[in-house]
Image (cartoon, rainbow, N blue to C red):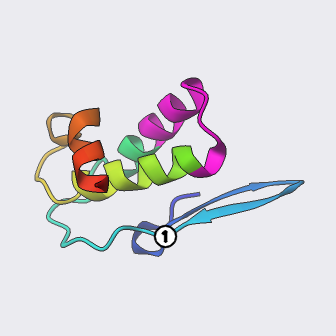
């Protein structure tokens, strides 16, 4: 579950994983959830643990909202990794 500026949570019967949102100045939040979900799914597909995939997704969504636009504003993986560093 994405919660905007309050981060995100992944809840199962066996527990809960939460990640904070990265503090940014939003320009356009359109597509933030899609960006999060895409990066989260990609992270899981690459073998990441849930928490690591969520952190990656959170960074991607944070970077996305600093840009106007939708699909054309989704950051590349290299941009996300630079943002995380």
Disc 1 secondary structure class: loop
Q: Quadrant of residue 29?
A: bottom left
**Residue that mark 1 sits on:** 20
Residue reaching furthest front? 85
Relative to the observer, which residue lies in front, 3 or 78? 78
Q: Is residue 58 above or below residue 7?
A: above
Q: Is residue 74 left or right of residue 3?
A: left
Q: Residue at x 12, y 54 (%)?
A: 67
Q: Would you say residue 85 sits in the magenta stretch?
A: no
Magenta region: which residues? 37-51
Q: Position of residue 27 (x, y in %)?
A: 14, 64
Residue 17 relative to residue 12: left or right: left
In this view, 34 is above or below 27: above
> Seen from this angle, which residue lies furthest left?
68
Residue drawn 35% across the image and 68% down it: 22
Q: Position of residue 80 (x, y in %)?
A: 28, 45
Quarter-of-image position of residue 73: top left
Q: Is residue 55 left or right of residue 75?
A: right
Q: Is residue 76 visible?
A: no
Tell me the residue at 29%/44% (across/down). Answer: 81
In the depicted structure, whether residue 24 falls above or below residue 68: below
Instruction: Provide the major secondary structure of the magenta segment.
Output: helix
Q: Is residue 56 above or below residue 62?
A: above
Q: Residue at x 23, y 40 (%)?
A: 74
**Residue 56 percent across, percent down from the top left:** 43, 47
Residue 1 can be seen, yes or no: yes
Point out residue 85 in the picture as x, y percentages from the top left corner. Answer: 28, 55
């Amino acid at each position: 579950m994405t919660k905007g500026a309050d981060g995100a949570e992944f809840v199962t019967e066996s527990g809960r994983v939460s990640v904070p949102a990265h503090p940014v100045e939003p320009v356009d939040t359109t597509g933030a959830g899609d960006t999060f979900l895409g990066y989260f799914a990609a992270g899981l597909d690459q073998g990441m643990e849930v928490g690591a995939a969520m952190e990656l997704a959170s960074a991607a969504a944070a970077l996305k909202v600093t840009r106007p636009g939708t699909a054309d504003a989704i950051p590349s993986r290299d941009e996300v990794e630079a943002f995380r560093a």
